[in-house]
Image: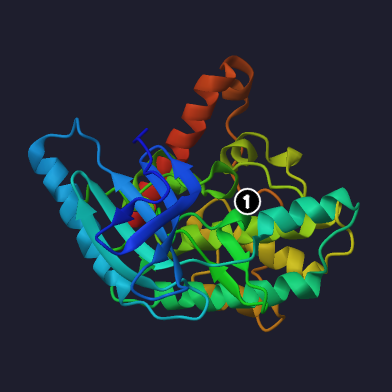
Amino acid sequence: MPVPLKTGEVLRGRYKIAGIIGQGGMGSIYLAEDTRLEGRQCALKEVEHDRSLPPDLLQEARDQFFREASILARLDHPNLPKVSDYFSIGVRDYLVMDYVPGNDLRTLIIETRQKGQFLDEELVLGWASQLADALEHLHSQNPPIVHRDIKPSNLKVTPAGLLKLVDFGLVKVLAPGEVTITILQGQGTALYTPIEQYGGDSSHTDVRSDIYAFGATLYHLLTNQPPAEARTRFLSPDDFLTPRQVNPSISLRCERAILWAMSLHPNDRPESISQLRKSLFGDMPPPARVNRTESTPLPARLLSSRPDGLLLWVALGITGLTLLLTLLQ
């Protein structure tokens, strides 16, 4: 893990580090003061590239960082933090964006659960509408931008009630046919990650991966518990609890929309955030085939004769092959 910057250190003669607000294997996210604009706080995302990469791949990674950072800097949407700067210092690259005050939704879930309550569905749907606005903006870019790490802890609500989708750490620009070595890629968080995103390979990732994570996030917000991982659902579909089994007060319409979004195969999900939004708010019913499992059970001989670890890889291999064949059609 890279050695973090010290409090009080100034980057680029402008950004004075106030402390660490997040940390990962490739760098940290810092709260900083913009000394050129008095009173403005910003978040600095730091990325240190793998020094073991060959020089040509390392340069490709850095070039990709700057290409994608320049695209993020052009985004302007009220539900996204504004990216205002990007630069390099030595082997580290930095992305500067607005600091978003307020609590993240994961914290709010914990507080609600401790009270023995559930979040109100109308409140959650209000946040869902704002999140849909942000994702429609990202997905409508040319080429589309997929966030790839939607989850409650990456959603913050400002004191004024504005929802912000934060942390562009795993964002992927979907340039057709492009194979990249980019530090902005990643696996996402397993609880909200669709099967096609496992392993960090973005070749099978598109806007429907964000749709799955959107549905999984709504499941967590409305039930106080995260859904089972996609690979667990594939192996044990009958063990998956629907939202209304956990929280009976959830409307049937909302549950059906969530289950549609969380279909294991991307072809079974809504094609766009717009379709999911219409389903959530009653303007478009999900397909009749949407059900609890949305997966094909493995042959009984595999279930009875394979150890769990190997069985998992068999399941994921079958899923990956199915996805590849679909994409090649």
**Quarter occupied by the N terminus:** top left
Report the coloring of the rendering.
Answer: rainbow
Tell whether 197 sits left or right of 294.
left
| Residue 204 is at least partly visible in this image | yes
Image point (58%, 33%), residue name: 298
Q: Is residue 215 above or below residue 60?
A: below
Q: Quadrant of residue 69?
A: bottom left
| Crowd tier of the residue under label 1, counting other residues whose Cα lies within 10 Å: few below 14, some 14–19, many 20 or above | some
Tell whether 270 sits left or right of 122.
left
Question: Which residue is disc 1 drawn over?
Answer: 294
Q: Position of residue 169 (x, y in %)?
A: 40, 54
Viewer-proximal residue, 103 or 211? Answer: 103
Q: Position of residue 78 (x, y in %)?
A: 50, 81
Q: Is residue 118 above or below residue 270?
A: above
Q: Position of residue 256 (x, y in %)?
A: 72, 65
Mark 1, secondary structure of its residue = loop
Tell me the amino acid under the disc marked 1.
Answer: Glu
Image point (48%, 62%), residue name: 208
Q: Quadrant of residue 117?
A: bottom right
- How many numbered discs, if any? 1
Q: Quadrant of residue 109?
A: bottom right
Viewer-proximal residue, 268 or 274? Answer: 274
Q: Position of residue 325 (x, y in %)?
A: 35, 49
